[in-house]
Image (cartoon, helix red, strand yellow):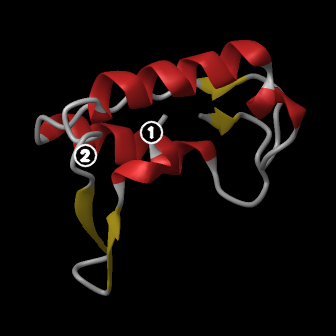
Amino acid sequence: MHGTADCSVPPNQSQLLNNALSSVGATSNLIFLEGAGHGGPEFTSPENLALIDDFFDSNLSEQSSKGFSFTLLNGLKSGYVPPSLFR
């Protein structure tokens, strides 16, 4: 999700990321929140929280029983997400 009135990170940056993820077959859903800035109550509406829950349920359900490892920023940040963090 990205606010269309975000003055900190231009909305097109999320579009570029979404396009790059999609181009390599990753699951990526981008929703622009009209008039929202860089955070705010628009991001935590019941409807948007449900969308986030649904995305995690759809994309992390196989890993939820065993957790998963991740690496970000070309290996500069890595970690493990234990199954206890999942519902």
C-alpha gap between disc 1 and disc 2: 9 Å
Query: Is disc 1 surrounded by few (<14), some (14 to 19) or many (20+) residues within 10 Å?
Result: some
Q: Earlier in the sequence, mark 1 or mark 2?
A: 1
Query: Is disc 2 surrounded by few (<14), some (14 to 19) or many (20+) residues within 10 Å?
Result: few
The quadrant in which residue 52 appears is top right
Residue 36, horizontal then vertical, whole percent: 82, 33
The quadrant of the image that shows the N terminus is top right
Tell me: 40 left or right of 67: right
Task: State the residue at coordinates (56%, 18%).
Answer: 51
Task: State the residue at coordinates (11%, 42%).
Answer: 24
Nearest the eye: 78 or 31: 78
- Which residue occupies the extreme right position in the image? 41
Under tag 2, what secondary structure?
helix
Q: Is residue 80 above or below residue 33?
A: below
Residue 26, horizontal then vertical, whole percent: 19, 37
Residue located beneath label 2 in the image: 20
Nearest the eye: 69 or 37: 69
Nearest the eye: 76 or 21: 76
Task: State the residue at coordinates (74%, 60%).
Answer: 8
Residue located beneath label 1 in the image: 15
Q: Is residue 69 above or below residue 64?
A: below
